[in-house]
Image (cartoon, rainbow, N blue to C red):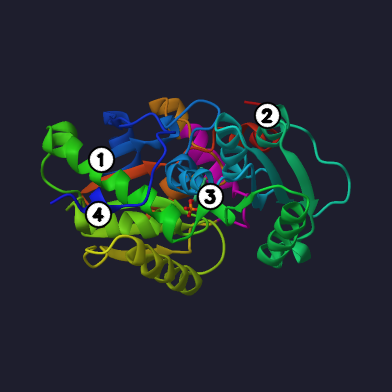
Amino acid sequence: MDLLAGAPARLPLAHLPTPLWHSDALDAFVGTEVWVKRDDMTGGADAGNKLRKLEYLLAEAKLRGANVVLTCGGEQSNHARATAIAAREQGMRSVLFLRRSSKKPPPVVANVFLDRLVGAEINFISGEQYADRDALMAAVAESLEAGGDRPYIVPEGGSNGLGTLGYIECMAETRRQLDAGFANGPEPFDTIVSACGSGGTSAGLGLGAAAFNVAPRVDAMAVLSTREDFEARIAALQTDARKLLPGLEDSAEIVVHDAYKGPAYAVPSEEQLGFIIELARRTGLVLDPVYTGKAMFGLARMPDKPKRVLFIHTGGLPGLLAETRRFGNL
Ligand SMILES: *Cc1c(COP(=O)(O)O)cnc(C)c1O
């Protein structure tokens, strides 16, 4: 049965399938068998987990005849950068709303540099304004429309029911890889570990892992907020995704962890920084201090570690390059 046959339209933006990567040195460092789904390789400058969501979101934008895409995120948002680049590839402009606490002009580096390079319009907004981001984007979309544009709004992180389908598709892809013998398949994994920032990736992994028998569980490593908040958000996203893809089974068990998020969003602890450095030196795997480094740190620190793990490398290289000063003099 092809569950995805009736799915909404999808643009082929990502380079798929992404590899299932393994390293004995990583197993030894983390303390269990880890297979890394290299979604940091979904693309070039637009790489990362957001590209899988954008395959569905920008397909809808194009079907609606959009010429400008609006989205939002933190100052160094990987999602906003991927959206700006992919939108431009598809012949659309982008307007970004990026949260910035300081009123000083931001350094034009890493993700912000790439946003500017592809000509995105950037509006830096305060945390207070960001709390009302959906209303703000709706108001700007309305005025663009009044001026003759055809705007399309992508929510924070590309996380809505439609974007969630990207990670259901990722699990279908992983099942095909297991059936072909990759990752010592076809046995499912014990769990899937991924960073969780707006919830769409975890929501899709949960539904897809169950539908395609990839794992009975997803460990979502929150990089902000609380376990209760993400449990509710992920459940709501799954409800919305089910409306678009009838026939989905129950989700894999979603276990949200909020103990590994470090001091604050985008702020790693000294221990987490040391972990990222040591892991890179032992394995050659490069993780970022905002998402993937914290998620892998959480896996390594988890009591009762699962025996066979699929770790989703969600990308974030520009986020690392924006934060090099935190790493001191390497
Ligand atoms: C956005 C992002 C995440 C979190 O994914 P969500 O679907 O928003 O939970 C994880 N890793 C990286 C590198 C990201 O950019």
Q: Amino acid at mark 4?
A: Ala
Residue 298 appears left or right of 267: left
What residue would you read off at disc 2? 118
Badge nearest the viewer, 4 or 3: 3
Badge nearest the viewer, 1 or 4: 1
Q: Secondary structure at mark 3?
A: loop
Q: Amino acid at mark 3?
A: Arg
- Sort mark 1 into few (<14), some (14-19) or many (20+) by Cα contacts within 10 Å: some
Badge nearest the viewer, 3 or 1: 3
Question: Is the C-beta separation of discs 3 and 1 under 8 Å?
Answer: no
Of the residues under marks 2 and 4, which one precedes in the sequence? Answer: 2
Question: Is the C-beta separation of discs 4 and 3 under 8 Å?
Answer: no
Residue 72 position in % (x across, y down): 65, 52
- Sort mark 2 into few (<14), some (14-19) or many (20+) by Cα contacts within 10 Å: some
Q: Secondary structure at mark 1?
A: helix
Q: Amino acid at mark 1?
A: Glu
Residue 75 position in % (x across, y down): 71, 46
- Separation of residues labelled 2 and 4 (CA atoms): 35 Å
Q: Amino acid at mark 2?
A: Val
Q: Which residues are magenta?
A: 262-278
How many numbered markers are drawn?
4
What residue would you read off at disc 4? 209
Residue 64 circle label? 3
